[in-house]
Image: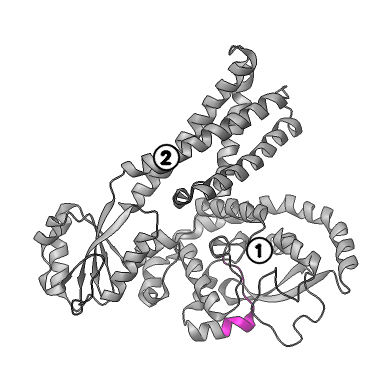
């Protein structure tokens, strides 16, 4: 129910964007020509521009519903997205002149009108339309500590839900709680109905309380949504908490036979996309070679052994971005590109633009890598990670990628085992939910990160 409401909100926002941008085309033509006689020659190309702009909005993060909580950030993000979109529109009309028009003045006017009315629409959506949705009333059943975590999770999210009550499996706390708190001994169907609960979130260790199962079975007839805490965290954070991961979890959620068609289609897509990138790599290599030679003494390429699919070792190649002998004291987790003294100046730029990754297109063509998947880790780091998390190896069920869900959601530098374990939670989310649609979303988000020069 919570996720369905989120999807509806995004659909309204995207539909509003499309209708408004189409209306801006009409207004632009009317202001310029005093009539709509030129409509037939402009509608098709400008509608394509509208669709490209909506993709640009997604890349910019403008369909993140939490963005409306900060008006200044919303304006800055919208302005940046519109400026990039204007460049895309000029490129579309002047690099692909198939429509026989070069509407420079129209584009600038269209940009200004869409900038004004588009931002006004977004303010209206976040301030008024979002408020028309009824906030979901949530009941939590489980330990007090988990109830507080769920409360904070909902409070800081854009899900539009509130934890209004908790049935705790420990002694009722004496301190004042931000929600109604009762003992598990007093759980009843009537109390759930009285509090108008719509969603029940289940905590851990409920097997010891059979009365909970009995009450929830009865409540199913009220069309309650019942989820566990892991599902809630997936919906709000895009990752799977490791405390819920065990052998049963993998058996329940990772049926690899169901992914066979997806893997086959994805492999074909990888080859199709890798071919133009291979030509781009060949084109850029002489320039990058010259710049690296001028910036730092040493080889042009740098190779590393990584752990690939099913634990198979592979060698990947990159343009060198670190000084020679940067790891003379042994391998260590990556620090921030901006502060890592091992990375020379040009190397920082190559990393931020992801140009250093281009030689790995060869690994994609070979089948070692895919465009989207968990990033392959070095074997020196895998063993200590397995020691901390016995199921870490199962991230190798999926073919590793050039970019992944963890890379677009966890932008901080990976400087410790703890950071890698946090990334593992995102990797598990990807492995569970991987699909062509999710892959496309990750690729678009990666483009946005590169344009903003974020990440490590």
Q: Seen in the image, is 74 located left or right of residue 381?
A: left
Asked if residue 379 lies in the magenta stretch, the reply is: yes
Q: Residues within 10 Å of mark 1 (few under 14, many from 20)?
A: some
Question: Dot 2 corresponds to which residue?
Answer: 125
Instruction: Name the foreground residue: 360 vs 161.
Output: 161
Whether residue 66 is situated above or below residue 392 in the rendered picture = above
Q: Position of residue 240 (x, y in %)?
A: 42, 68
Q: Which residues are magenta?
A: 374-383
Q: Seen in the image, is 399 located left or right of residue 364?
A: left
Instruction: Name the foreground residue: 41 vs 253.
Output: 41
Dot 2 lies on which element? helix
| Badge 2 or badge 1: first in the primary sequence | 2
| Residue 359 visible to an observer of this rendering | no
Count of numbered tags = 2
The quarter of the image holding the C terminus is bottom right
Image coloring type: one colour
Q: Position of residue 375 (x, y in %)?
A: 60, 68
Which mark is in front, 2 or 1? Answer: 2
Question: Dot 1 corresponds to which residue?
Answer: 367
In percent of the image, x 31 and y 41: which residue is there?
Answer: 132
Asked if residue 153 lies in the magenta stretch, the reply is: no
In percent of the image, x 56 and y 85: which residue is there?
Answer: 384
Q: Position of residue 96 (x, y in %)?
A: 73, 32
């Amino acid at each position: 129910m919570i996720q369905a409401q989120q999807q509806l909100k995004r659909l309204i926002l995207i539909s509003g964007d499309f209708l408004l941008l189409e209306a801006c085309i009409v207004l632009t033509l009317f202001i310029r020509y005093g009539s709509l006689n030129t409509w037939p020659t402009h509608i098709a190309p400008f509608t394509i521009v509208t669709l490209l702009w909506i993709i640009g909005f997604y890349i910019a993060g403008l369909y993140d519903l939490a963005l409306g909580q900060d008006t200044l950030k919303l304006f800055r993000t919208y302005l940046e997205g519109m400026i990039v979109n204007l460049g895309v529109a000029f490129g579309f009309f002047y690099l692909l002149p198939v429509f026989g028009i070069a509407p420079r003045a129209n584009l600038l006017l269209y940009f200004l009108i869409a900038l004004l009315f588009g931002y006004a629409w977004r303010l209206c959506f976040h301030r008024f339309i979002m408020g028309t949705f009824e906030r979901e009333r949530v009941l939590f059943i489980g330990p007090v500590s988990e109830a507080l975590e769920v409360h904070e999770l909902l409070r800081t999210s854009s899900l539009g839900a509130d934890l209004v009550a908790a049935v705790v499996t420990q002694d009722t706390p004496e301190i004042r709680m931000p929600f109604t708190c009762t003992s598990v001994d007093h759980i009843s169907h009537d109390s759930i109905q009285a509090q108008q609960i719509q969603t029940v979130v289940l905590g851990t260790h409920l097997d010891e309380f059979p009365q909970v199962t009995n009450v929830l079975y009865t409540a199913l007839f009220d069309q309650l949504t019942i989820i566990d805490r892991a599902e809630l965290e997936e919906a709000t954070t895009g990752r799977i908490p490791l405390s819920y991961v065990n052998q049963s979890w993998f058996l329940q959620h990772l049926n690899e036979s169901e992914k066979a068609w997806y893997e086959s289609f994805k492999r074909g897509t990888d080859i199709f996309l890798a071919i133009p990138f291979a030509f781009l790599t060949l084109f850029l290599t002489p320039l990058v070679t010259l710049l690296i030679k001028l910036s730092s003494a040493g080889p042009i390429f740098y190779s590393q052994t990584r752990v690939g699919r099913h634990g198979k070792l592979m060698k990947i190649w990159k343009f060198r971005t670190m000084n020679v002998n940067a790891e003379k004291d042994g391998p260590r987790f990556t620090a921030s590109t901006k502060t890592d003294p091992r990375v020379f100046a040009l190397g920082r730029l190559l990393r931020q633009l992801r140009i250093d990754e281009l030689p790995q297109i060869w690994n994609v063509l070979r089948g070692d890598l895919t465009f989207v998947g968990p990033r392959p880790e070095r074997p020196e780091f895998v063993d200590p990670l397995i020691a901390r998390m016995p199921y870490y190896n199962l991230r190798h069920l999926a073919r590793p990628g050039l970019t992944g869900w963890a890379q677009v959601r966890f932008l901080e530098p990976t400087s410790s085992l703890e950071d890698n374990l946090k990334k593992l939670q995102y990797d598990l989310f990807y492995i569970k939910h991987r699909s062509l649609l999710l892959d496309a979303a990750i690729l678009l988000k990666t483009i946005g990160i590169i344009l903003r020069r974020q990440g490590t």
